[in-house]
Structures are given as structure tokens and as C-alpha cells.
Amino acid sequence: MIDWNRYNAAVFRASTKRLKGIDALDPIRLEDLVGLDEQKRRLVENTEAFLAGKGAQNVLLWGSRGTGKSSLVKALLNAYAPQGLRIVEFYKEDLPHLPEFLDEIRGEPWRFILFLDDLTFAEGENTYSYLKSAMEGSIEAPPENLRVYATSNRRHLVPEYQRENAGTQVGEAGEIHYSDAVEEKIALADRFGLWLSFYSPNETAYLKIVEYYFRDEKVDKEALRRAAIGFARERAARSGRTARQFWESYRKDPGILR
């Protein structure tokens, strides 16, 4: 049993079939996430409603890799842990153990986010059925003090295939009746009441993120711009993660700005 007075976050370990409290948390803050104002606003509003016991949604943060989806959830914990927010991370292969966790936290005074990072399901995987029960319950209602925040590079967590649409029909009034296979997969995504999308920043937005990391450094702005753009081109990726990696490379070798 986790001492939630001591730990703000925990991760499920399959080897012991128990939660492990996390001592060293990522110190990222909400203000460190540049260019995500709308996503931050909506997620903060939802989280504050959850903490206040008001209507709050399960959240799917989806979009391009390295754009701040996971960092935003971690920053939420750092901001709201003093108000009773706690985060528990599960990996998708461990979802069959989810019912035991729900029993453990049901009725606790804390407000829990079940964090599922980089969540997608391959064909044939059916552990997502445990997740559906956690969000909407089965014969037993889901815990009132739990919400699911999941990140994914895909909008649809479970892949759909053309052959599965063979049974889809259009009714006389134009309504769509999906095949059973597609209906089951859509049902998982539908359980997330709030969808937040994340896209790779354009060059201007990327450079603003770089400038934030270098805000306390006295460097030549044009040299910084050239080096940052070159760094992103080498990796064929322009994102907040790329900007942070560029900053970390500079700290190791300031000569990259030459």
C-alpha cells in the first residue's frame, strides 16, 4: 500500500504486481511549456474541476511526437500535488491488474490520475477492455476519485482495418451503423470526453521554444537561430523535445553556436 502523504506519484511494477512510489519526479513546470497555451488552459480547467469534485472528463492527448503531451501531464502534478492530486502510471500490458488498483484507491481522499503514456493497441490486443471499465465501470461504478489521462501519437487508439468495415451500413435516414468490430474500437475513444491535439510547431514557434531555454544565456541571437534550425534539420524533427535536446547539447558544448 502506497503512503500517499509521502508520494505524489507511483508506477505499477508487473514483477511485484504492486505500485512503487516515485521519489525523483520530473521537475517540469507548466510555465516551461511554451506554445501550448490552449492545451494547458483546457487541461488545467478539467483538472481543477476534478479536484473540486465537479464534472471532469477523461482526457486523450494525441498528436505528433515530442510536442509536450507527457510533459504537460507531469507539469500538472507538480502544480496541483499540494491540492491532493496524485498520478499513477500503468503500461498497457499491465492493464489486467487495473481492477485491483481501483479497489485500492476507491474511497481514498486523494484525486488520482491514471496516466497511460504513448498508448496504442495493436491488432489482437484486447487489454483495452480493462481500461473501458475503469472509465465507465461495469456492474460496479468507476471510482469517483479517478480520471484517465492518456497520451498517444494516434487519434484512434485501436487500429481499424478496411475488412472490418464490411458490415457497416447506412440507414434510410442517412445514419451510419458500424460493423461490430469497428463499433467496439470506436467505443474506447468515445470514453475520453476531452480530446487535446498537439502538432509539430512551425519554425517560428520552434525558435520561441529555443529562446525560452536560452532566456538566461548571453548568446548571439543570429548564431542561436542558425544553430537551432540546423540541429532540427539534422534530426528531421522540429518540436519542443528537439528544442530541449538542442539546449542540453549547448550546455555540454557551447561551441555548437559557432
Image: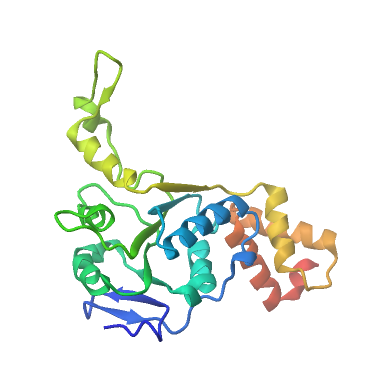
Q: Position of residue 148 (x, y in %)?
A: 36, 59
Q: Give the position of the C terminus as an image quadrant.
A: bottom right
Residue 176, quarter of picture:
top left
Residue 85 appears in view:
yes
Q: Nearer the viewer, residue 81 or 255?
A: 81
Does residue 108 lie above or below 42 as drawn?
A: below
Q: How is the image coloured?
A: rainbow
Left or right side of 113 for 73: right
Residue drawn at x 36%, y 81% is 4
Residue 238 appears in view:
no
Does residue 212 lie above or below 182 as drawn?
A: below
Residue 31, quarter of picture:
bottom right
How many labels, in total?
A: 0
Q: Nearer the viewer, residue 160 or 48?
A: 48
Left or right side of 58 for 233: right
Q: Nearer the viewer, residue 111 or 190?
A: 111
Residue drawn at x 67%, y 78% is 252
Left or right side of 258 for 53: left
Outermost residue toward the top? Answer: 172
Q: Give the position of the N terminus as an image quadrant.
A: bottom left
Q: Nearer the viewer, residue 75 or 249?
A: 75
Residue 150, quarter of picture:
bottom left
Q: Position of residue 251 (x, y in %)?
A: 69, 76
Outermost residue toward the left? Answer: 139
Residue drawn at x 70%, y 68% is 213
Q: Position of residue 27 (x, y in %)?
A: 55, 76
Left or right side of 148 for 177: left
Q: Position of residue 235 (x, y in %)?
A: 59, 56
